[in-house]
Amino acid sequence: MATMTDVARSAGVSVATVSHVLNGTRPVLPHTRQAVLDAVEELGYTPNTLARSLVTSRTRSIGLAVSAISNPYFTEILQGVEAAALESGYSLLIADPHDDPEHERKVVQLLHERRVEGMIVAPSAHPRELLAYLGRHRVPAVFLDRVVEDPGDGGPRFDQVCAESAEPVARLITHLAGLGHRRIALVAGLPGLSTTSERISGYRHGLEGAGLPFDERLLVHGDSESDGAERATGALLSLDAPPTALVTANNAMTIGTLRALRAHGLSVPEDIALCCFDDFAWADLFSPRLTAIAQPSREIGARAVQVLLDRLAAPDRPARTVRLPCAFVHRTSCGCPDRPEQRARPPQPPRTRRPEQKTQQSENQRPEKGSPS
């Protein structure tokens, strides 16, 4: 295996010069730099990253702690994080906290012991131990998807990147109300998560805007899981006056809700209308095609990496919360007649959006006026 000394000898430079070229620690003349890179390529030299980290105290690695990695939403976030990290020269260490506060603190400690330079974390519903650990050890961290407010002054203690939650749910309610529905139910997520409380807020705001009363019996919790949503939907369908339309607050709960509807012999949208928060790859393959809110999942992941790198470059900068807009994907499960697909997905870096796609998204994000067309 080639060594740095071999590279230096082949390029006709000192070992220190090779080190400066590979680590970017000092400017090197262009022709000298190219000679080193040519020697690296010819000899097949691979830098010893472990030895480099011992010398520089930098591992060029990022820790990612997100639950339910099998969830398509988090899978796309992972793709965004990985691509952005790799582009910036960072490797990725991944752990699943299982949305359990105690396990969450353990995996974050484990990542910290692996000397990651910073972390991206989707916090649990009760992240007190997480906050204490990150604060005590001054770990650079970005919270992903879920917002955690500082109990002191109401502002975030850590940088945060997430999608809008309240307004998109309100939009779904407005759309369903415009189609004539008066009993619209929400299958909400796990209590304690910011995404759950924000989507409930959007639900109530949408009802208020449509002039509909809030009925607490139409708000149920599926705990962000398929099985929980199936049970919660069954409870809704057992009411003396069941809902005529449903909104599910994430993609896993959409699957559970569909199972419950099938078990009760109900068809969508003939017997009951359905809209969901979270679009996913096969949502357009269902019959009917699912009307959904699409989160910019890959962009969320990529932006979280950039915010973390900004934090590493300027540790004392004020914490910030970045919220990204969602897209309304109008299909047929809401009860609207079929029409040529106008699917709009939020921008997915690093791809370049075509002009016609941008126009299409803008059309889809216009407020619905209640007309099926």
Image: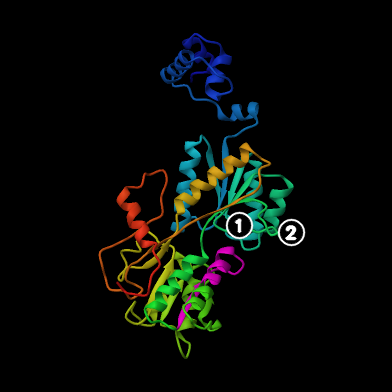
Q: Are marks 1 and 2 in contact (CB under 8 Å)?
A: no
Q: Where is the C terminus found, in terms of image quarters?
A: bottom left
Q: Report the mark closest to the observer, 1 or 2.
A: 2
Looking at the rendered structure, the kind of residue marked 2 is Gly
Identify the residue at the far bottom of this view: 240
Disc 2: which residue? 152
Q: Please tell me which residue is depicted at 54% across the width and 47% down the height of the picture.
A: 304
Image quarter of residue 335: bottom left
Q: Which residues are magenta?
A: 183-202
Instruction: Please rate how many residues cluster around mark 1, counting C-alpha atoms within 10 Å: few if below 14, some from 14 to 19, many from 20.
Output: many
Which element is circle 2 on?
A: loop
Looking at the rendered structure, the kind of residue marked 1 is Pro
List x then y, in percent, for residue 115: 64, 39
Horizontal relation, residue 212 to residue 318: left or right? left
Disc 1: which residue? 123
Horizontal relation, residue 270 to residue 99: left or right? left
**Is 197 part of what is drawn in magenta?**
yes
Horizontal relation, residue 174 to residue 19: left or right? left
**In the depicted structure, whether residue 49 falls above or below residue 173:** above
The answer to whether residue 231 shows anywhere in this view is: no
Q: Please tell me which residue is depicted at 57% across the width and 55% down the height of the picture.
A: 122
**In the depicted structure, whether residue 45 falls above or below residue 192:** above
Q: Please tell me which residue is depicted at 49% across the width and 76% down the height of the picture.
A: 209
**In the depicted structure, whether residue 93 falls above or below residue 183:** above
The answer to whether residue 297 shows anywhere in this view is: yes
